[in-house]
Image (cartoon, rainbow, N blue to C red):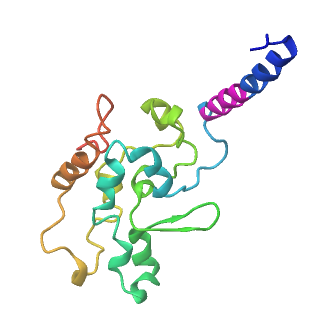
């Protein structure tokens, strides 16, 4: 084997250094919350990180995830139905069907990064909502037409147990996803 010249060594080291620098720069970018008004990003993006903690797959099996598909096309066209059966629209105009993560936790564009989400105080400061009974009552209320009301009354204290179970793998030392008030 021939001895390596300084020039050959530099040709090997410089690209590695540049690639590492780009990686660190991207990591630093994620530290800062997004600027401007928060926008919806959609459950697909939330689930990218919440797949391994069990929250994403658990949500996908809930009635909230399927809320939009339970409506007829006529009901989907009614704003009073749509407001509780879908989440809203992304900044690009994609309609977020179903009751997705951000319907309860608020638009995620400003708190979506892992660097922010790993610190609940930072996430809340960036717009993450920890929903309470008042937040749930925006949709779970007596304004639901009688023919669509559940057979058994919706009771927050019971419903929040299910939500806590869905989030149990993720929520460890942090405050629970719903406060149980």
Against 128, residue 103 (above or below) is below
Against 115, residue 67 (above or below) is below
Magenta-colored span: 19-30
Does the segment drawn in magenta span residue 27?
Answer: yes
Q: Pinpoint residue 12: horizontal percent, then vertical percent.
A: 77, 22
Q: Quadrant of the N terminus?
A: top right
Q: Residue furthest front?
A: 1
Left or right, 70 with respect to 16, comes to: left
Name the foreground residue: 171 vs 148: 171
Name the foreground residue: 28 vs 96: 28
Q: Which residue is found at the position 40% from the left and 45% from the top? A: 50
Q: Pinpoint residue 83: horizontal percent, then vertical percent.
A: 44, 70
Q: Residue furthest right?
A: 7
Q: Quadrant of the C terminus?
A: top left
Q: Residue furthest bottom?
A: 74
Q: Pinpoint residue 147: horizontal percent, then vertical percent.
A: 22, 84
Q: Which residue is found at the position 12% from the left and 69% from the top? A: 152
């Amino acid at each position: 084997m021939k001895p390596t010249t300084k020039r050959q060594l530099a040709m090997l080291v410089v690209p590695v250094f540049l690639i590492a620098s780009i990686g660190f720069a991207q990591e630093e970018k994620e530290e800062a919350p997004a600027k401007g008004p928060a926008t919806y990003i959609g459950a697909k993006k939330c689930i990218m990180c919440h797949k391994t903690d069990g929250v994403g797959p658990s949500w996908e099996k809930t009635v909230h995830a399927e809320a939009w598909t339970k409506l007829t096309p006529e009901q989907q066209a009614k704003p009073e139905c749509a407001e509780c059966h879908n989440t809203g629209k992304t900044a690009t105009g994609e309609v977020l069907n179903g009751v997705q993560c951000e319907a309860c936790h608020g638009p995620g564009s400003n708190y979506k990064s892992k660097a922010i989400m790993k610190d609940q105080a930072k996430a809340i400061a960036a717009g993450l909502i920890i929903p309470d009974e008042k937040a749930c009552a925006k949709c779970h209320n007596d304004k639901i037409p009688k023919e669509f009301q559940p057979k058994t009354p919706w009771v927050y204290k019971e419903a929040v147990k299910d939500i806590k179970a869905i989030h149990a793998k993720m929520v460890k030392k942090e405050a629970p996803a719903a406060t149980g008030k």
